[in-house]
């Protein structure tokens, strides 16, 4: 009888002392619904980080309270969630958007013209080539392609760098993304500096 009582006490004390395990689970997808592998998921409030698997899934053991998620993946815009009140395990689905879309067309004309009819050198860089380049900035992607684009340090005191295309200064260059003006007068733009 004493053995039974001791076993019963041990079982109930184990159940009473057990913490409620809360999990933040989810799936990270791209804008087309495809899973994103090896995205970094961070919960700064508790200092935990994990990486998504090949199916885009992640799971982090958390404790109750207010948290937010930060998700990072090269080639995608970093994501920060709103503050989440964790009272029970949650399942999330998060969509990341690419930092550079589809393809890059580099040309020296101001009007859209079929590539076969362009009188000047034109380059089209496909989304596959963008991914394979491993570049993190527009400059790195274009520079690795080897299309006559380079950065030149214009001021040794302030470390100001300008982007030159086909030998022309930045003021003669414009960057358009999806036919919309993204950058103009690249001699005033310093993101491309080393």
Image: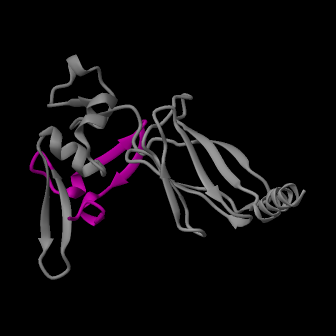
Farthest front residue? 1
Q: Which residue does the image show at 19% across and 30% down from the upper left?
A: 122
Q: Where is residue 3 shown, x and y percent of the image? A: 83, 57
Q: Is residue 68 visible?
A: yes
Q: Where is residue 33 shown, x and y percent of the image? A: 56, 29
Please state which of residues 95 and 159 is positioned toward the viewer in this rendering.
95
Q: Is residue 179 left or right of residue 59?
A: left
Q: Where is residue 73 shown, x and y percent of the image? A: 42, 48
The N terminus appears in which quarter of the rendering?
bottom right
Please state which of residues 180 and 33 is positioned toward the viewer in this rendering.
33
- Is residue 173 magenta-colored? yes
Classify residue 163 by image quadrant.
Answer: bottom left
Q: Where is residue 101 shown, x and y percent of the image? A: 41, 37
Please state which of residues 94 and 165 is positioned toward the viewer in this rendering.
94
Q: Which residue does the image show at 62% across and 43% down from the upper left?
A: 26
Q: Is residue 30 left or right of residue 172?
A: right
Highlighted magenta segment, given as a residue range? 165-194
Please state which of residues 31 and 3 is positioned toward the viewer in this rendering.
3
Q: Which residue does the image show at 20% across and 80% down from the upper left?
A: 158
Farthest top residue? 116
The C terminus appears in which quarter of the rendering?
bottom left
- Is residue 109 magenta-colored? no
Q: Is residue 105 visible?
A: no
Q: Is residue 157 left or right of residue 92?
A: left
In this rendering, the count of numbered labels is: 0
Colour setup of the view: one colour
Q: Is residue 160 left or right of residue 77?
A: left
Up/down of 194 relative to 79, above or below = below
Q: Which residue does the image show at 86% across and 54% down from the upper left?
A: 4
């Amino acid at each position: 009888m004493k053995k039974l009582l001791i076993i019963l006490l041990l079982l109930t004390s184990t159940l009473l002392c057990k913490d409620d395990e809360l999990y933040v689970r989810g799936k990270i997808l791209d804008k087309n619904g495809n899973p994103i592998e090896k995205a970094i998921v961070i919960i700064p409030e508790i200092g935990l980080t994990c990486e998504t698997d090949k199916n885009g899934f992640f799971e982090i053991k958390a404790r109750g309270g207010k948290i937010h998620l930060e998700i990072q993946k090269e080639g995608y815009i970093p994501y920060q969630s709103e503050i989440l009140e964790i009272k029970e395990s949650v399942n999330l689905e998060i969509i990341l958007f690419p930092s550079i879309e589809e393809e890059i067309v580099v040309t020296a004309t101001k009007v859209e013209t079929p590539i076969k009819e362009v009188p000047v050198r034109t380059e089209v860089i496909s989304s596959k080539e963008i991914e394979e380049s491993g570049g993190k900035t527009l400059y790195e992607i274009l520079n690795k392609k080897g299309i006559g684009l380079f950065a030149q340090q214009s001021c040794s005191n302030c470390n100001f760098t300008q982007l030159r295309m086909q030998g022309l200064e930045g003021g003669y260059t414009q960057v358009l993304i999806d036919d919309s003006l993204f950058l103009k007068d690249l001699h005033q733009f310093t993101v491309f500096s080393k």
